[in-house]
Image (tube, grey):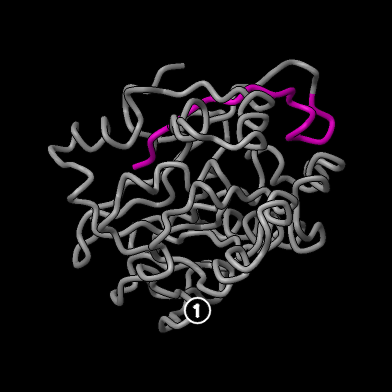
C-alpha cells in the first residue's frame, strides 16, 4: 500500500500538456510493503518535517520548502502509519530509494538500522559533489544520513530477472522475484520504478516518470516544466512511453504524485 505524506498544489498545466490553470493537489506517496523474506520494507519515505520545519535547515532547503509549500499529512507520516500496522521505525528492515530528491528521502534519518537499496554509483556522485552542485540536481545532501554509504545495498549488483508486460528486465531486490527495480531514466539521476511482479495484475510503481496519469497518454506529457526538472528530457519521454506500453499490455501503474485516488492507497487519506 502507499501512504500520502503530503499535498503539493500546482496548476494542472504544469503536469499535463493542454491542462488548465486550476490547481491540482498532487500527492507525495511512499510505499509500505511486507516482503515475505526481508520483512517490512518502505519504498522511499515521502516528505516530512525535516523539509518543512526541521532545525538547522540550510537556506536553500528553507527556500525550497517555501516555494513548494508542502502540506504535510500528519496521520500518513511514517511513524503514524507504522503504528497503525502495530510496528515502529525499528521494525523497518529495508528502504528502497528510487532516487534522491527531497520528497523521497526526507524521513531517512528515522530509520538508522534499515538497509538502503539504491544505486551506489549515484550516491557516490552525490557525495563527491559540492552542496551547490547537488542543488542543481534537486538533491539536498543534508537530508541524507551520514552513515548511508555503509548501509547501501547496490541494486546494480543484484541478479536480474525478466519483468512482465514488456518491461524486459529488472533487478531482483529480494531474490524471490516479488519486487523488481526497473530503470525509468530521465527524471533524476538513476531514477527507477518498482514492479510488483507477483500480483495477479502486475503493478508498476513508476514514481516520477510523470506527475499525472493523464500525462502518460501520447502528446500529453508537459513541455517546459518537465524540461526544467528532468536530467534527460529524451530519456524521460522514453520512460513515459515504457510505462504507457506496460499499461497497454495489461499491467497496472501508479505514480508518486498523481492526485487521483488509487486502490493501492492507504485507506483514510484526507482529500
* Quadrant into which the N terminus falls: top left
Most extreme residue toward the front, as rendered?
56
The one of 165 and 142 positioned closer to us in this rendering: 142
Query: Which region of the structure is painted magenta?
Result: 1-19
x%, y% of residue 71? Answer: 51, 21
The one of 263 and 25 positioned closer to us in this rendering: 25
x%, y% of residue 226? Answer: 78, 45
Left or right for 122, reference 133: left
Instruction: Determine crowd level at label 1: few under 14, some 14-19, many 20+ residues with C-alpha closer than 10 A.
Output: some
x%, y% of residue 186? Answer: 71, 60
The one of 203 and 237 positioned closer to us in this rendering: 237
Give the residue drawn at x 51%, y 57%: 98
Left or right for 77, reference 105: left
Image position of 203 with respect to 128: above or below: above
x%, y% of residue 146? Answer: 42, 58
Give the residue drawn at x 31%, y 71%: 174
Give the residue drawn at x 68%, y 37%: 214
| Residue 86 colored in magenta in the image | no
Give the residue drawn at x 25%, y 58%: 113
Residue denoted by label 1: 156
Image position of 169 with respect to 193: above or below: below
Amino acid at each position: 500500500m502507499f501512504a500520502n505524506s503530503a499535498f503539493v498544489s500546482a496548476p494542472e498545466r504544469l503536469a499535463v500538456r493542454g491542462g488548465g490553470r486550476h490547481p491540482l493537489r498532487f500527492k507525495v506517496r511512499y510505499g509500505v510493503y511486507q516482503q515475505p523474506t526481508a520483512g517490512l520494507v518502505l519504498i522511499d519515505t515521502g516528505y516530512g518535517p525535516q523539509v518543512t520545519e526541521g532545525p538547522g535547515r540550510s537556506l536553500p532547503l528553507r527556500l525550497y520548502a517555501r516555494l513548494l509549500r508542502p502540506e504535510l499529512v500528519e496521520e500518513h507520516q511514517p511513524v503514524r502509519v507504522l503504528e497503525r500496522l502495530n510496528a515502529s521505525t525499528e521494525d523497518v528492515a529495508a528502504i528502497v530509494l528510487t532516487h534522491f530528491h527531497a520528497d523521497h528521502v526526507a524521513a531517512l534519518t528515522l530509520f538508522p538500522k534499515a538497509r538502503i537499496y539504491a544505486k551506489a554509483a549515484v550516491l557516490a556522485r552525490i557525495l563527491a559533489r559540492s552542496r551547490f552542485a547537488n542543488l542543481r540536481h534537486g538533491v539536498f545532501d543534508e537530508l541524507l544520513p551520514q552513515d548511508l554509504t555503509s548501509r547501501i545495498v547496490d541494486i546494480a549488483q543484484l541478479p536480474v530477472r525478466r519483468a512482465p508486460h514488456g518491461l524486459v528486465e529488472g533487478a531482483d531486490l529480494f531474490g524471490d522475484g516479488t519486487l523488481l527495480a526497473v530503470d525509468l531514466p530521465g527524471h533524476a539521476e538513476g531514477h527507477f520504478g518498482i514492479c510488483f511482479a507477483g500480483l495477479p495484475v502486475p503493478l508498476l510503481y513508476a514514481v516520477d516518470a510523470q506527475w499525472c496519469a493523464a500525462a502518460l497518454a501520447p502528446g500529453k506529457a508537459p513541455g517546459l516544466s518537465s524540461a526544467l526538472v528532468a536530467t534527460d528530457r529524451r530519456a524521460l519521454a522514453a520512460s513515459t512511453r515504457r510505462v504507457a506500453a506496460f499499461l497497454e499490455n495489461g499491467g497496472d501503474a501508479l505514480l508518486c504524485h498523481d492526485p487521483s485516488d488509487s486502490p493501492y492507497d492507504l485507506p483514510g487519506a484526507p482529500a
